Image: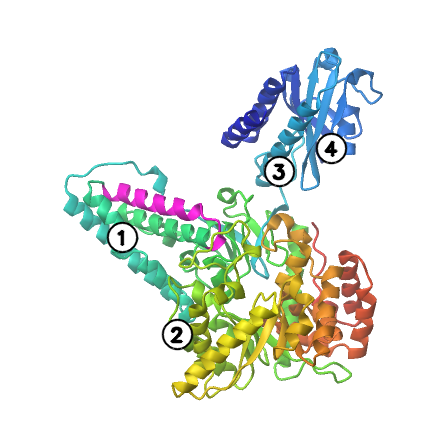
Amino acid sequence: MLETLRKIVQEVNAAPDLESVLDVIVRRVQRAIRTDVCSIYLLDRQRERYVLMATQGLNQKSVGRVSLSVEEGVVGMVGQRAEPINLEDAAAHSAFTYLKGTGEKKFHAFLGVPIIHHRTLLGVLVVQQKLIRKFDESEEAFMVTMSAQLAGVIAHAEATGSILQISDHTKNEADRKFEGVSGCIGVAIGPAVVMTPLADLDGVPDRKVDDIKAEVATFKRALAQVRRDIKRVGRSLAKRLRSEERELFDVYIRMLDDNALGGEIIARIKAGSWAQGALKQVIGEHVQQFSMMDDPYLRERATDIKDLGRRMLTFLQESGPALSEIVFPENTILVADELTPAMLGEVPTEKLVGLISVHGSGNSHAAILARSMGIPTLMGVVDLPYTRVEGLNVILDGYSGRAFINPSDDLIECYQEVIREEDEVNAGLEGLKELPAETTDGYRMPLWVNTGLIADVARALDRGAEGIGLYRTEIPFMIRDFFPSEQDQMETYRKQLEAFAPRPVTMRTLDIGGDKPLSYFPIQEDNPFLGWRGIRVTLDHPEIFLVQIRAMLRAAEGLDNLRIMLPMVTSVREVDESKRLIAQAVEGLREEGHNINQPLIGVMIEVPAAVYQVRRFARRVDFISVGSNDLTQYLLAVDRNNPRVADLYVPYHPAVLKALQFIVLEAHKENVSVSICGEMAADPAGAILLMAMGYDVLSMNATNLPKVKFALRGISFERAKTLLNEIIVMGDADKIQAALSSRLKELGLGQLTRPAIPD
């Protein structure tokens, strides 16, 4: 059975459309079980009826014409119960309904299995036989397995529009919703502009050449044109990116050097291949190597290589850069199969309002740049039929990770209201920059920011940030092709420290692994989130750790506003070892003549194991910081970057709230300050709860800082504590969220809550 199932799955995956898939299933299942009939009934939600969509054994003329109501027949009973029903004689069952014209009257044995995808009933898979007998357990197990395979295919077909009608009643194509992962928060509405590949590498044929010297010259001219093109793109982004972010385009150019892709392609040409064929071979090999790698960051490099290959092929074909010919309307939402950093430079920045990528993750180069530019972005919208959305109106919801294609007027109005309210709120918050985050009864709450790029600093200072609660040092590492030197790191860190001096700057030591691997330091693991990451990596490589610490200490010389934070700690041994290495770096620099002061040292509480060791950590460090994003996903066992379980990632889960309260209470028993730097601190309602819990500092993205300040200035500390006491005993995240929204409105802070958006 296993081998049969494998072959069916392969054939299903190769089928060109849903109709072919259904045909494959009914034919192959009928043959595998040696039964007389196999049929598939799909649920038409508009009419609330099961429609016969494919069969092997019943009358083919009844396909698409015969249907049952959701409460009718044994098929309806399968759907209602959401479990298999196995009958030796279906006709004798009280629920049996004969479907005229199908010829099923002569069949007795019946086995029906529901087709369910993510809790949504899609239809019923049925086998029938003339004999009066029950299907055995192995047959039932096979059917359940087959149904699970079919569910994903049908769901994808419905999502992409491959199946727009399953009866004579056309389904509503408006408000078609697609799920992804947020790359950058925000809402955008506008027409989609699809950025298609520059050239089709797969279509290049193999061909030999006689004049190798001329072919090499042709390729080198194309190479030079690509270099100029990339430099042009980099210049077009110069006004929105600082030098640190622009280094990514230098990485692109270095990939074309003689000792990289360029050299390999020339070697293939010299072996007798024409330039386009050599390009196809080299790019294909590299793309395959990177695409098969386990960690997400390395897979993203395949996108970069494909983009370079397409650009080179475009010039080789003497067609010119096709992207420059695109006309971009106002409020463009750029859509691509694989969004690349270079694509961002092709769109006039004043017209670009949103980005959608079918593939990729929040860790891709494109997502990193989108966040630095403040453009609402969705990544990994895998079901989106991107080739068919050109010119269609799109709503991009970067908060929920959703995109709506061809939205209805009502939905557009709903989201336009969100944008209007956000604009009004932001306009009203501009005067808060110089005011403290102080409650109506005089309680002062310091608000800091999270940064990762130089561009973040100006935004943070412009919004009145009082310090940096988290500087993500891994981002400068991620946009390079090699470890930055001590001097390079020192110069980067100095910019952050100088900009905020004398205000504190908290620098997290290199936090790679998980969803943040480095291309030049590959970490291949089956489960990277539970693997070699954070402090585990740097303690195993003290040569990397010490260089970074020395760079931080040198950068802070004369400023003395540095705080060093250790990520992903799970034991006091890690803290003690890190402190020993930091002390070693301090002593070494002093011996070299530097005037170095001992910095404050803290740890991040991000895993459940650390929650119950807070007091032990507090006795060894100067401050505690909570990374609520990772802590939430570890407590709930939910990957926050996975759209399939995104709805389970709920910051206001009762377990998360109780863990956060426990941490601050334990740390304060040792008189150690506690900050929090996750997304919960950036939510006005969350900030109120965290303040009431006793957190000493809230750190957030610069965009949300004014909203949080406004919320805290609109409530008394005593009222916040009352709200916390009300919320902390509640046992349901949805009810907690609703209660918080209601209380904010009662306090006159309703403008800080987003209106309910229909699913």
Specify whether residue 280 is painted magenta: yes
- What residue sits right under mark 1 in the picture? 262
Indicate left or right for 630 with 312 as reference: right
- Secondary structure mainly formed by the magenta segment: helix
- Callout 4 amino acid: Arg
Residue sitting nearer the eye, 458 or 64: 458
Disc 1 and disc 4: Cα gap in Å?
59 Å
Please tell me whether mark 3 sits on a helix, a strand or a loop: helix
Q: Mark 1 near mark 4, Cβ–Cβ under 8 Å? A: no
Of badges 3 and 2, nearer the viewer stands: 2
The mark tally for this picture is 4
Q: Position of residue 444 (x, y in %)?
A: 70, 83
Of mark 3 and mark 2, the one earlier in the sequence is 3
Q: Position of residue 551 (x, y in %)?
A: 43, 77
Of mark 1 and mark 2, the one earlier in the sequence is 1
- What residue sits right under mark 2 in the picture? 486
Of mark 1 and mark 3, the one earlier in the sequence is 3
- What residue sits right under mark 3 in the picture? 155
669 to 92, vertically: above or below = below
- Callout 2 amino acid: Glu
Disc 3 and disc 4: Cα gap in Å?
18 Å
Please tell me whether mark 2 sits on a helix, a strand or a loop: helix
- What residue sits right under mark 4 in the picture? 47
Of mark 1 and mark 4, the one earlier in the sequence is 4
Corner quadrant of residue 419: bottom right
Highlighted magenta segment, given as a residue range: 274-297
Of badges 1 and 2, nearer the viewer stands: 2
Disc 3 and disc 2: Cα gap in Å?
51 Å
- Callout 1 amino acid: Gly
